[in-house]
Amino acid sequence: MLSGRRLDLLDPSPLDVELSDLAHGLARVARWNGQTKGDHAFSVAQHSLLVTDIVERLKPDASVALRLAALLHDGPEYVIGDMISPLKAVIGGNYKRVEKRLQEAVHLRFGLPAALPVAWTRCIKRADTIAAWHEAITLAGFSEKEAGQTFARPRGFDPTGLDLTPLPAAEIERSFEERVRSFERAGSPTVPAKAKQASDSESLR
């Protein structure tokens, strides 16, 4: 990594996850294999900021921990890139195992449980799907019919004010890093007791 850290892909340590590496990498990984409109790629970091904004709209009382988890939901991609879903299906289990271990390391690095509570996962997944739908039709050239064949059409969500203008990598890198730091300044993430116990047990394995 640019920070000098060496990250073991098969056994990643939270101690080797640096925010600067995470923000830098995600801001330079393109969504949709780069097949998007605009002068700049729509990066995973910008997508992550978008998903966090949507979570905050879906759940205005979302805890700092849930918002942080949304921001980090594609954390592994700073190391392994954003692989399109059809290719993930071809590669199969080994990719998923590497991705899962990296995600757990990212979570633990920022004070989250290795495995998120189910309610958080569902909320983030819904926000992720909403983001993907609007990216598909706004940036990736999908018709609404084509998008509907891949993603569930968003219901009960007002997209007014969502900004999907692809921005320069350096700008998004700064925004992503500052958003993480703003959550850190807001205080330690509040994690449900059961999830915290699961996290502690996982970290000892």
Image (cartoon, rainbow, N blue to C red):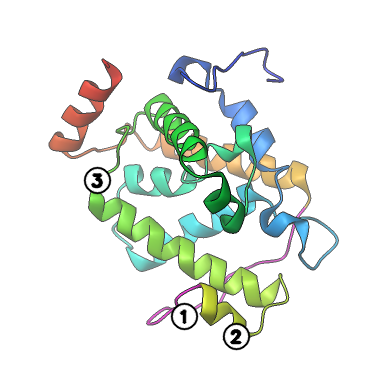
Nearest the camera: 165 or 95? Answer: 95
Quadrant of the frame with the C terminus: top left
Q: Label 1's element?
A: loop
Q: Position of residue 39 (x, y in %)?
A: 86, 61
Q: Looking at numbered disc 2 in the image, what kind of residue is underneath it? A: Glu
Q: Is residue 71 left or right of residue 170?
A: left
**Badge 2: how crowded within 10 Å, few (<14), some, or many (20+)?**
some
Which residue is disc 1 drawn over? Answer: 153
Tell me, yes or no, whether the highlighted magenta stretch contains residue 54: no
**Label 1, label 3: how far apart the Cα atoms are:** 25 Å
Q: Label 2's element?
A: helix
Q: Which mark is residue 117?
A: 3
**Label 3, label 2: how far apart the Cα atoms are:** 32 Å
Residue at 49% from the left image edge and 32% from the top image edge: 98
Q: Is residue 56 visible?
A: no
Nearest the camera: 101 or 138? Answer: 101
Q: Looking at numbered disc 3 in the image, what kind of residue is underneath it? A: Pro
Q: Position of residue 76 (x, y in %)?
A: 53, 36
Q: Position of residue 187 (x, y in %)?
A: 34, 33
Quadrant of the frame with the N terminus: top right
